[in-house]
Amino acid sequence: MSQMMHIDNIPSTPGKFKMEKSPYNRLRMHFSLAKLTFWSLVFLGLIFVFFYRSPASSSPVSSDLSRRSLRTSSYGGPAWEMRIKASAKVRSRNGISVLVTGAAGFVGTHVSVALKRRGDGVLGLDNFNDYYDPSLKRARQALLERTGVYVVEGDINDTTLLKKLFDIVPFTHVMHLAAQAGVRYAMENPGSYVHSNIAGLVNVLEICKSVNPQPAIVWASSSSVYGLNTKVPFSEKDRTDQPASLYAATKKAGEEIAHTYNHIYGLSLTGLRFFTVYGPWGRPDMAYFFFTRDILKGKSIPIFEAANHGTVARDFTYIDDIVKGCLAALDTAEKSTGSGGKKKGAAQLRVFNLGNTSPVPVSDLVSILERLLKVKAKRLVMKLPRNGDVPFTHANISSAHKELGYKPTTDLQTGLKKFVRWYLNYYGNGKKSAQ
Ligand SMILES: O=C(O)[C@H]1O[C@H](OP(=O)(O)OP(=O)(O)OC[C@H]2O[C@@H](n3ccc(=O)[nH]c3=O)[C@H](O)[C@@H]2O)[C@H](O)[C@@H](O)[C@H]1O
């Protein structure tokens, strides 16, 4: 019987496998050794490059981020730089070049598309973490790519990456939207709020203050900074020292940090206090989004009420109105005044409410959804849990109106109609459903 051996029959322990003797064996072994040494060196080199560039060491704050994917993927190289330059290229007269952090997020996507469509240069940055379904973020990324916006995958705490981006493009503006959002999740994962909303913000500002020229920065604060404030409507002059959640506290801290960087380094800074933004491509962790999903599934939905059966209400603001406010903030932002890390003169420092000025009770939101979805909700009315939620929000927008020409035009009924149309289309008429 022939002793020929098929590749599948070679013993798995090489030590037990006898090499066939041949005059060419020595020569083959010599070449194999040389090859082995060469590939080992290549492998060691790659390991060195990987660890040397790893962002983990550049984060000044450690937090519980184990379940999230924050690692910056490999970057660099001429093709990568060309993509960045093409995306950030200004195509209109008087256009601006904007680095949008959190570009694959809800507001980030809409703002990036709007900027790109009017001819501004836009580069996105996003870490694609799994706070909510990352496939929705990937779908937004695909939309952005179709519009000509490239999204670099990386974390705002990655100093090396941020520096590199500014080396490639001298951005005139930064639209800083990357953040850990959500009021209730702060009790589950407080570290993620410190990582993104404090350490991440400081890292972005550190880079902005040291580059030349310094960009102007517009960034996302939140209506939640009004916390337990009872004076309505909320005005920018009202007290914001009673946050009801860690989320709110980190956004409030952000406003103080902004003051410091403006004061010391001359950075032009505008904080926008968004009021419960909703609309197509929204965030699945928000009530209007998961109420829609659960009503369609026939699942009961918890509707919070305040003490003594009091109404819980929100000044829900439609995404297109928010986008107009963001663009107006960028367009009216004055230049930063510092250079080489030193302030040369006083710089602009602003905070604006971007709301709808028309609070709607959460139970009315559910009634609108019922009508649009043609499904009756299973309402489970319960006391507002002590988890960071506040009973109501209501924006005074006179300052934004005066300085930015901000004038919201979409009521909740109209905005939710657009959201529901998008939802049914995106999730296949409710057959697929949001996670
Ligand atoms: O303006 C902001 O700065 C914030 O807006 C948003 O927070 P909120 O206004 O709290 O929105 P959202 O969670 O959708 O709850 C809406 C309403 O439903 C009620 N609500 C909520 C959950 C539930 O199970 N039942 C319920 O009644 C709840 O009590 C509330 O009255 C952003 O998520 C946040 O990231 C931040 O940007």
Image (spheres, rainbow, N blue to C red):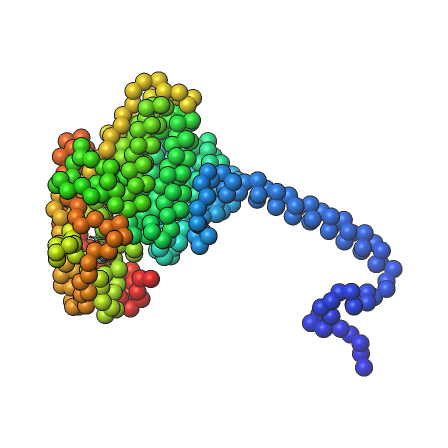
Q: Residue furthest front?
A: 308
Q: Residue furthest top?
A: 344
Q: Is residue 223 above or below residue 130?
A: above
Which part of the image, by quadrant, shows the C terminus? bottom left
Q: Residue furthest bottom?
A: 1
Which part of the image, by quadrant, shows the N terminus? bottom right
- Nearest to the observer: residue 359 or residue 99: 359
Residue at screen point 37% across, 26% down: 214
On the rendered structure, is 20 left or right of 107? right
Image quadrant assignment for residue 370: bottom left
Image quadrant assignment for residue 204: top left
Residue at screen point 59% across, 42% down: 49
Residue at screen point 33% across, 51% down: 187
Q: How many marks?
A: 0
- Nearest to the observer: residue 234 or residue 317: 234
Where residue 270 sits: x, y (%)?
27, 32
Q: Is residue 364 above or below residue 323?
A: below
Q: Is residue 299 above or below residue 254?
A: below
- Nearest to the observer: residue 51 or residue 45: 51
Where residue 120 sits: x, y (%)?
31, 36
Query: Is residue 67 in sight in this rendering?
Result: yes
Where residue 275 sits: x, y (%)?
21, 44
Where residue 157 sits: x, y (%)?
44, 40
Query: Is residue 123 in sight in this rendering?
Result: no
Residue at screen point 47% across, 40% down: 59
